[in-house]
Image (spheres, rainbow, N blue to C red):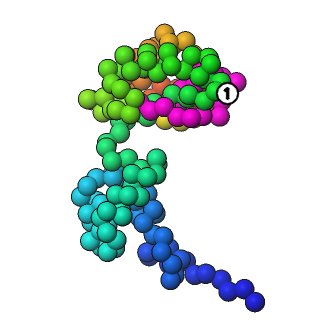
Amino acid sequence: MQTHRRYNFKNHHFAGEEGHLIPLLQQAQAEDGYLRRERLEQIHRESGIPLSQIYGVATFYAQFRLKPVGKYLLRVCHGTACHVSGANAISKTAEDYLKIATGDTTADRLFTLETVSCLGCCSLAPVVMIDQATHGNLEPSDVKNILRKYKKAAGDAGAPGNGNGEAAS
């Protein structure tokens, strides 16, 4: 007869087992937008997990951020199809236009620029995603125009697109 593990919802782990740190970090990041030092120290105090272990996990997994991110997360695909279709030029154009390096956030905290290994939109190469909106078949000049629209929309307190979460271009 197989015994079933009980899930401890209060502490986010299976009863009698380790493993509740990642859900705690995910929750903290969901609430704050990134992992603030004060929040990591709070997790340490309340859980008893060594701060070094908390930082080890937070820096190991790419899903966690230790710096604030912009209102819009701009991800440039650098998968094979995008790479051969000009992803480097797309990234360089975004860096130049936003005046930041990949991995950074603009001073006004409007954009964070990242590269990713693949967005799964190879037929649209080269591709960028801004939050959940996919923009494909891009030329470097297209990137500037798209970013201008997002900047304008931020001033108008909205995001450009078709309103249903589908690809905007």
In percent of width and height, residue 131 lies at: 49, 35
Identified at 41% across, 58% down, the residue is 57
In percent of width and height, residue 162 lies at: 56, 27
Q: Quadrant of residue 50?
A: bottom left
Q: Is residue 163 visible?
A: no
Q: Residue furthest left?
A: 38
Q: Quadrant of residue 92?
A: top left
Is 115 located above or below residue 84 in the figure? Answer: below
Give the magenta-colored segment's residue range. Answer: 113-130
Drawn side of residue 4 relative to residue 100, left or right: right
Q: Residue furthest top?
A: 141
Identified at 31% across, 42% down, the residue is 68
In percent of width and height, residue 167 lies at: 60, 28
Q: Look at label 1 and name its amino acid.
A: Cys
Report the front residue among 49 and 26.
49
Identified at 40% across, 17% down, the residue is 148
Query: Is 138 contained in the magenta span?
Result: no
Identified at 48% across, 31% down, the residue is 115
Q: Which residue is the site of mark 1?
A: 122
Drawn side of residue 79 relative to residue 27, left or right: right
Secondary element type, mark 1: helix
